[in-house]
C-alpha cells in the first residue's frame, strides 16, 4: 500500500506509518512529553487566578469600572463614543459583550473565564505547531509553548484582567496558519486588527507573490466586513478615533522614561490621569509626543525598506518579521502598558516553534523585560508615578531591555533576509535558514 506523501492525508499507508511511529507513552491522544507542560499550565493558571482575588490592589478594577459599563452601553446599541477612555477599534466591543452571554456567572467571572480559554487556545496552538502543524508541516520546537506557558505568569494576574489575551489568541492562530492558508491567516489577522490595531502588522513578512496577495487582501476584506456590520448594528462606531488621537505621553513609555529622568533633574511636569491612563502634563510633553509619532513613522519606513530589500524567505521569516514589526511599534509608541508584553511574549513564542528562527536571543530579552514589568506594575507603580529613583530605575531597566530587543530583532531579521552585496541565495543557508521553493513565490521579486 503506497504512501501518498500528503501532509493531511487519511485512509492510506501514511496513517499506518504514523501509528507505528507514534511516540511511546501517549495517553488520551497526548504524548507523554507534553504532560509536564499541561501540569505546569494548570498549576500556574490557578495561582494567577488566586492572585486575581488576593493580589496587590484591585488588578481587576478596569473590568469592574470600565468593561462592565461599556458592555451595558453596547447592549443598548451604542459604542461608548463619549467616553474618552474608549480608544479601541470597534471589534473590541464584541469582546466586551461576550461575558454577558454566559449564563449564571457574573460579568467579571465570565470575562476571566474567556481570557483563560483564550490562554488555553494559545498554548494548544503552539503545541500543535511543535508537533508538526507549522508552515512546512514538519515537527517544530516545544520552546514556544513553554515560553508562553512560563512567560505569561510573570505578569501576575494582569493577563486575566485585560482583554489582550483574546486578541493575542487570534493573532497567534493567524500566524500559525498563514504559511499554508494565507487567506485564512489574513482573515484572522483582519478580525484581530479590529479589536486592537497591532495584528495588522503580523502579515508584513508573508512571502512575495500569491501568498502576500491573498493574506493582505484577506486582512482588508475581513476588517472592512466586520467594520461594516458593526457600523450598521451600533451607533458611535468611529468615536474611538478622536480619543486615541488625543492621547499624550504615558508614564511607562520610552518618551515617558525621558520625562521621568527630566523630572528627577528638576523639570516641573506632573503626572495625571488623562485619557484613561497616567500621562505627563507640562512643558515639552507635546514635543516628546510628536517625537514618538515621528519614530513610529521611521519604524514603518524601515519595515517597508526591509520588505523591498528582502530576498531570502524561510519558514521562520513571517514569524520573525511579525515580532520585529510589533516590537518596533510598541517601543516607539506613546503608550507602553504592561499588557503589551502579552503580545510580545506570544509572538516570540510563535517564533520559537520554528528551529530556524533568528529571534531566540530576542525572546530571552523579552522574557526578562516581562519579569521587570511585574515589578513596574503593580509592585512599584506608586514609585513610578512619583518619579522616585527606585521607580525610574525599574522603568529604565524594562524599557532598556525592550529597546535592546527591538534593535537586535531588526538586525537579525535584516541579516537573515537581505543578502549582503556579492552574495547569492545561499545567504539563507549560511544563516541556518532553509529558503522556501521558488515556485511558491517565496524567493525573489514580485
Image: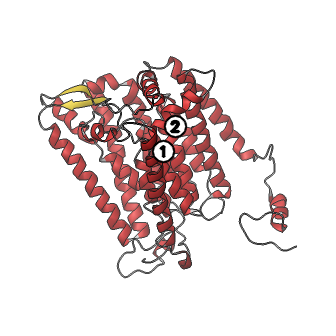
Name the side, left or right, on which 281 lies relative to 166.
left
Query: Helix, strand or loop at disc 1?
Result: helix
Q: Is residue 8 visible?
A: yes
For the C terminus, the quadrant is bottom left
Count the labels in the image. 2
Callout 2–callout 1 Cβ contact below 8 Å: yes
- Taking 214 as reference, is 251 above or below it? above
Name the side, left or right, on which 50 lies relative to 301.
right
- Taking 16 as reference, is 129 above or below it? above
Kindly indicate the quadrant of the structure image that contains residue 98. top right
- Taking 321 as reference, is 150 above or below it? above
Percent x, y of residue 261: 20, 34
What residue is shown at x 66% (from left), y 59% (from top)?
A: 139
Residue sitting farthest toward the front: 232
What residue is shown at x 26% (from left), y 37% (from top)?
A: 247
Question: Mark 1, residues whose alpha carbon is within 10 Å: few (<14), some, or many (≥20)?
Answer: many
Residue closest to the eye, 392 or 172: 172
- Taking 157 as reference, is 301 above or below it? below
Percent x, y of residue 102: 61, 28
Q: Which residue is mark 1?
A: 345
Query: Between marks 2 and 1, how big is the CA–CA gap?
Result: 8 Å
What residue is shown at x 34% (from left), y 50% (from top)?
A: 329
Q: Which residue is mark 2?
A: 152
Percent x, y of residue 177: 58, 57
Residue closest to the eye, 37 or 185: 185
Q: Which label number is shown at residue 94?
A: none
Q: Is residue 367 visible?
A: no
What residue is shown at x 50% (from left), y 36% (from top)?
A: 95
Residue closest to the eye, 292 or 244: 244
Percent x, y of residue 106: 56, 20
Question: Mark 2, residues whose alpha carbon is within 10 Å: few (<14), some, or many (≥20)?
Answer: many
Amino acid at each position: 500500500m503506497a504512501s501518498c506523501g500528503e501532509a493531511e492525508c487519511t485512509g492510506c499507508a501514511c496513517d499506518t506509518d504514523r501509528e507505528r511511529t507514534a511516540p511511546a507513552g501517549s495517553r488520551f491522544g497526548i504524548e507523554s512529553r507534553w504532560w509536564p507542560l499541561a501540569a505546569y499550565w494548570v498549576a500556574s493558571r490557578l495561582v494567577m487566578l488566586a492572585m486575581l482575588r488576593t493580589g496587590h490592589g484591585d488588578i481587576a478594577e478596569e473590568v469592574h469600572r470600565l468593561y462592565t459599563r461599556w458592555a451595558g452601553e453596547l447592549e443598548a446599541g451604542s459604542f461608548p463614543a463619549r467616553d474618552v477612555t474608549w480608544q479601541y477599534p470597534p471589534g473590541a466591543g464584541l469582546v466586551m459583550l461576550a461575558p454577558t452571554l454566559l449564563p449564571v456567572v457574573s460579568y467579571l467571572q465570565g470575562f476571566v473565564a474567556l481570557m483563560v480559554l483564550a490562554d488555553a487556545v494559545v498554548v494548544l496552538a503552539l503545541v500543535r505547531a511543535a508537533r508538526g502543524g507549522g508552515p512546512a508541516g514538519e515537527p517544530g520546537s516545544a520552546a514556544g509553548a513553554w515560553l508562553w506557558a512560563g512567560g505569561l505568569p510573570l505578569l501576575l494576574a494582569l493577563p486575566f484582567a485585560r482583554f489582550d489575551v483574546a486578541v493575542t489568541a487570534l493573532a497567534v492562530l493567524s500566524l500559525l496558519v498563514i504559511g499554508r492558508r494565507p487567506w485564512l491567516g489574513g482573515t484572522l489577522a483582519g478580525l484581530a486588527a479590529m479589536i486592537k490595531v497591532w495584528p495588522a502588522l503580523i502579515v508584513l513578512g508573508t512571502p512575495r507573490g500569491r501568498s502576500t496577495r491573498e493574506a493582505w487582501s484577506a486582512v482588508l476584506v475581513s476588517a472592512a466586513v466586520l467594520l461594516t456590520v458593526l457600523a450598521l448594528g451600533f451607533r458611535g462606531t468611529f468615536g474611538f478615533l478622536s480619543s486615541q488621537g488625543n492621547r499624550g505621553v504615558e508614564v511607562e513609555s520610552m518618551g515617558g522614561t525621558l520625562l521621568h529622568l527630566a523630572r528627577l533633574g528638576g523639570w516641573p511636569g506632573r503626572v495625571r490621569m488623562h485619557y484613561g491612563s497616567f500621562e505627563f502634563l507640562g512643558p515639552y510633553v507635546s514635543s516628546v509626543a510628536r517625537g514618538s509619532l515621528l519614530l513610529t513613522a521611521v519604524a514603518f519606513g524601515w519595515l517597508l525598506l526591509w520588505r523591498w530589500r528582502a530576498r531570502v524567505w524561510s519558514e521562520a521569516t513571517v514569524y520573525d518579521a511579525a515580532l520585529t514589526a510589533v516590537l518596533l511599534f510598541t517601543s516607539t509608541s506613546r503608550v507602553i502598558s504592561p499588557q503589551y508584553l502579552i503580545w510580545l511574549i506570544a509572538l516570540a513564542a510563535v517564533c520559537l516553534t520554528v528551529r530556524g528562527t533568528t529571534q531566540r536571543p530576542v525572546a530571552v530579552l523579552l522574557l526578562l523585560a516581562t519579569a521587570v514589568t511585574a515589578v513596574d506594575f503593580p509592585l512599584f507603580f506608586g514609585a513610578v508615578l512619583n518619579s522616585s529613583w527606585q521607580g525610574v530605575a525599574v522603568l529604565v531597566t524594562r524599557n532598556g531591555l525592550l529597546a535592546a530587543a527591538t534593535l537586535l530583532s531588526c538586525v537579525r531579521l535584516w541579516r537573515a533576509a537581505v543578502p549582503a552585496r556579492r552574495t547569492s541565495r545561499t545567504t539563507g543557508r549560511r544563516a541556518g535558514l532553509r529558503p522556501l521553493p521558488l515556485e511558491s513565490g517565496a524567493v525573489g521579486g514580485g
